[in-house]
Image (cartoon, rainbow, N blue to C red):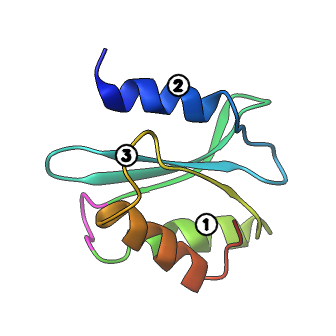
Amino acid sequence: MISREKRHQRIRAKISGTAERPRIVVFRSNKYLYLQAIDDQKQKTLASASTLKDKDEVAAKLAKALTDQKIKKVVFDRAGYQYHGQIKKIAEDLRKEGLEF
């Protein structure tokens, strides 16, 4: 098991998402970023966005989808990635869009 997966397991033991406060998880491939807002109690994805089409507006798309569902508070799950670079930029962009975490 790689270090990122171990860190992700430790993080996931402490946080979970609900319908009122979903968990936003980030997955980073070599080429793209994927974001999902997940309700862990119902095991359901509430909203998702990726950089497959628009590279710069992934956080804005996810924030708009969540505000349309009247969700303002979220839990940020960095999925074991270090909090710098793209992960930090996504978190800052989500905060600028009005989400609280």
Q: Which residues are magenta?
A: 51-55
Label whose residue precedes the other's in the sequence (3 or 1)? 1
Asked whether 12 or 46 is in front, the reply is: 12
Instruction: Tell me which amino acid carries mark 3.
Output: Tyr
User: Between marks 3 and 2, how big is the CA–CA gap?
Assistant: 12 Å
How many numbered badges does the structure rendering display?
3
Tell me the residue at 39%/26% (across/down).
5
Q: Is residue 41 magenta?
A: no
Instruction: Tell me which amino acid carries mark 2.
Output: Gln
Q: Measuring from the top left, give residue 37's x and y in whole percent.
A: 60, 50
**Contact flag, marks 2 and 1 (Cβ < 8 Å):** no
User: Between marks 3 and 1, how big is the CA–CA gap?
Assistant: 24 Å
Tell me the residue at 27%/71% (across/down).
54
Residue marked by disc 3: 81
Tell me the residue at 22%/43% (across/down).
29
Of marks 3 and 1, the one in the foreground:
3
Query: Quadrant of the image for the N terminus?
Result: top left
Residue marked by disc 1: 65
Helix, strand or loop at mark 2: helix
Disc 1 crowd, CA 10 A, few/some/many (<14, 14-19, 20+): some
Specify whether 2 is left or right of 66.
Answer: left
Tell me the residue at 69%/28% (across/down).
43
The correct choice, above or below, for 42 with respect to 24 in the image is above
Query: Quadrant of the image for the C terminus?
Result: bottom right
Q: Which label belongs to residue 9?
A: 2
Q: Measuring from the top left, give residue 36's x and y in whole percent.
A: 52, 48
Specify whether 52 is left or right of 25.
Answer: left
